[in-house]
Amino acid sequence: MSDIPHQVSDFISKSAPFDVLDEDKVSAIATKTKVIYLTPENQQALIAEHQPSLFLIQTGQFTVYDENGIARFMSEGDYFGFTALIETGKGQIQVEIDSPGVVYCIAKPIFDECMQNKVFAKFFHAAKDDVLQNQAVSDSNSMWLYKPLHEQLSKAPIQIEQHDSIQLAAQKMSKHGVSSLIVTEDDYLIGIVTDRDLRNRVVAEGMDINLGVSTIMTENPAYVLHNQNMFSAISLMSEKNIHHLPVLHADDRSPVGMVTTSDVIRKQRGNVLFMIGELSKTANLYELTRIAWQIPQYFAANAKRAGDFDIAGKVLSQATDIMTRKLIAFFIEQHGPAPMGYCWVVYGSQAREDQTMGSDQDNALLLAQSPNEAEAEYFKQMAEYVCKGLGKCGIKLCDGNIMASNPELRLSVDDAVVQAKKWINQPTPEAILAFNIFLDARAVEGDRTLFKNLQQRRKPLFKNDFFLAALARNANSDAVPLSVFNKFVYRKHNGKKDCINLKVNAIALINNLARLYSLSAGITIPNTVERLNILGQINAITTEDADNLRDIWLFLNRLRWRHQLRNNVTDNIISVSDLSSLERHQLKASFKSIHRAQQAVVMKLSGGVA
C-alpha cells in the first residue's frame, strides 16, 4: 500500500462525478486516498481492512458480487462499495480477481462530505438504483412535449351550444378569460369560435350579436386526442397555421380541453418548429425544395440545448411528412384525383419520428384494391414523382429500394395481409431482416382507414409465439459494444480508434426491444418513446425498466444529434474521447442496461433460447 497523491489526483479529477468538484477539493481527497494492489491472494484481507470505502478501479479486472449474489464485471473507471456507504446495514463486498490491479480507497467520511454536492450525490444514488445517471433527461424542459395532453390541461374547456348567441359567446370569453370557445351539439364538437372571429366577422362587419354563434364559427376544426402528446398538437397547429386546437377524449370524442399558441409559448423556449409552418405555406416544388434545404442549416443554428435534440427527430419527421403531403398534392393538381382510395405509408425512422440528417426514405403505397393497368400506371407515376421529389428536398433515396416507387411496395390491403402471413409463417433470417423494416409504420396521407384496416388485420398475426421468438432471437444477435469486463469495444473511423456506432450498437437495439414488447402487447403506435411509456403503464414491462430505457434512448439520441450538428456529418459514429467523463459513465451504464434488457426479452419471448 502506498500514497501517490499526484497520480491519484490526476486520475480522480478525470473520473465522474469527481470532475464536478473544484481542483483544491480533489487534491485534498487525493492526499487522503489509499492505494491498494488487489491480487487473488490479498483481496479478501485488503477489502475487509478498508471497508466501508468507495473503491475506484484504476487498473485490473474484477467480478464484484452484491448482497443478492448478482455478479458485475468491472474494470478501469468503475466503482464498487458505494451501496454500503449510502445504505447502512448492507453486507460485505465479495470480490473475485480476474486480473490483478490498482484500486483507490476513498474512506466513508470523505465520501459523505462529497455527497453534500447535489450532482455528486445524484450520480451515486442513480448508480445504486441501477438506472442511467443522466440528470438532464428526466428534468429536461423538453419532457413536457412527450407527456399526454390530459396530464397538461390545466382546466376544462369552455363550451357553448351552436344555437346560443354571439353576444353570449363574447360574455363567456370575457368571464372566463379565454380567447376561444368550443361549439357543441349534444356535447360533441362541431366548431370553434375565437376572439379573432368576433373582431373580423362581427365587429368589423357590424353583424347582429343576437345571431347564433354557428354563423361565425369555424366548422369541423382540426383536433387532437387527449392521449396524444403535446408535440403532436404543436406540429398540427404549425402545419395548419392555427392558434386554437380542441382536445377530445380518445374514447367518446367528448371535448376535454383546448391547446392554444399562448400555452405553447409559455412552455416552449426554443423555436425549432418554425420550419414546419414555412413548409406548409409552399405552393410549388421549387418553393418546397428551397425551404427544405434550409432545414439542416436551421437545426445547426438553433438546436443548442439538450431539449432541442430531444425533439429534433420529431421535427424533421414532421417536416418530411409535410413534404410528402405537399408533393402528393402537387401531383394530383397536375394529373387529377386518384382513381381509387390509397394511403401513403412510411416506415422506419420517419414512422418512429426519430429521423436524423442521414435518414433515407422508407415508404409505400397502400391501395384499396388491386389496380388495373391504368390505375397501376397512375400510382406508379405518383410514387416516382413523390420519391424523386423527396430526394430533391434532401431526403435521400433508399439504397434498399424500400420505396413506393418499387412496384412490390404498391399493394392492396388484401395483398399486404397475404405478404405478412407469408413472412410470419416462414420467419427465415432473411425474412425477419426484411420484415423488421415494416414493423414500424405510420400513415401520412390519403385514406387512413386503409392503414387502420391493415393494422387491425395484422395485429393478431404479430402475436404469433413462433414469430415473436424468432424476432427476439434476431434482436439479441446484435450486441452492445462492451467486453466481458465492461470495457468499451471500439472501431476505427476517420483516423480515430475509439469510435462507437450509436445507431447500430445502441439506439437500434432499444428500438428493437420496444418494438418486440409492443407487438406482443398489441400496441400499434411506432414511436419508441411512446411505446415505452405505454408498456410501463400496462405493466408489459416494469415502470422502472420502461423509464430507464426511455431515458437511455433520449440520452443516446442527444449524443447522436450533437455529434451530427457539431461536426456537420450525417453518420452516427461518435468518438468516446469527445465525451465528458460523466457522459462516458452514462454511456457505459446505458450499454449495461440495454444488454440486460436484451437478455430479458429473449427469456420472455423465446424461452431463453438465443
Image: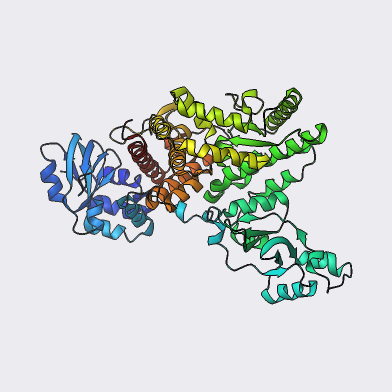
Residue farthest right in this picture:
206
Q: Nearer the viewer, residue 35 or 347?
A: 347
- State left or right for residue 168 relative to residue 546: right
Q: Confirm whether residue 310 shows in the render.
A: yes
Q: Position of residue 3 (x, y in %)?
A: 20, 46
Q: Is residue 568 above or below residue 234?
A: above
Q: Nearer the viewer, residue 90 or 371?
A: 371
- State left or right for residue 169 relative to residue 477: right
- State left or right for residue 466 relative to residue 445: left
Seen at 59% across and 46% down, the residue is 303
Task: Quadrant for residue 417, please give it.
Answer: top right
- State left or right for residue 217 relative to residue 314: right
Q: Position of residue 14 (x, y in %)?
A: 35, 44
Q: Confirm whether residue 362 shows in the render.
A: no
Q: Nearer the viewer, residue 397 or 435?
A: 435
Q: Position of residue 205 (x, y in %)?
A: 89, 67
Seen at 51% across and 48% down, the residue is 530
Q: Is residue 138 above or below residue 426?
A: below
Seen at 68% across and 53% down, the residue is 237
